[in-house]
Image (tube, rainbow, N blue to C red):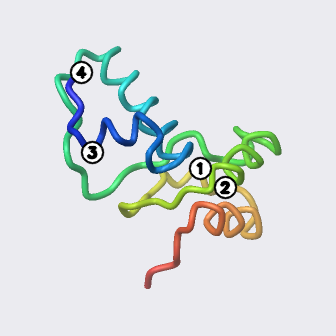
Amino acid sequence: MYLTPDEEKLMNGESGPTYQKAIEILAALGDIYGADRLIPIKSAQIAGVSYKTIGDAGLEWISDLKGKVVVPLFSIPQAWTWNAGEKWELARILHISSRK
């Protein structure tokens, strides 16, 4: 899969391990699905981030990433069926602010 020079820099870890891991995952998925390249996005769905799914270990892994989202994120409603405290803790870790 073709990566732009900026994407190659991410792949080489020039922006840190969190962004490197993200581009590695995206590139691997692109290869699996036969994508020619990545495409620009304006938002993204967060999948599989329910505390009931990831538990303490998943929450710790996300906490350790030290990254910041660069596009607005959303999740399907059932991913937020946990208590409000857990929801806002995950939002804080992902650097998601509440928008009204």
Q: Amino acid at mark 3?
A: Asp
* Residue 24 figure quarter: top left
Among the two numbered marks 2 and 4 on one chain, the one whose residue lies closer to the N terminus:
4
Label 2's element? loop
- Per the image, the residue denoted by label 1 is 79
Picture coordinates of residue 15, whole percent (x, y)? 45, 50
From the viewer's perspective, is 62 left or right of 77? right
Q: Where residue 80 sits: x, y (%)?
A: 62, 57
Residue at left offset 56%, top offset 43%: 17
**Which residue lies under the disc numbered 3?**
6
Q: Are marks 2 and 1 in contact (CB under 8 Å)?
A: yes
The residue tagged 4 is 1
Between 95 and 16, the one lying in front of the other is 16
Alpha carbon distance from label 2 to label 1: 6 Å
Residue position marked by numbered label 2 in the rendering: 81
Q: CA distance from mark 1 to mark 3?
A: 32 Å
Q: Amino acid at mark 2?
A: Thr
Mark 2–mark 4 CB contact (< 8 Å): no
What is the distance, in whole Å, between disc 2 and disc 3 at their CAs? 37 Å
- Amino acid at circle 4: Met
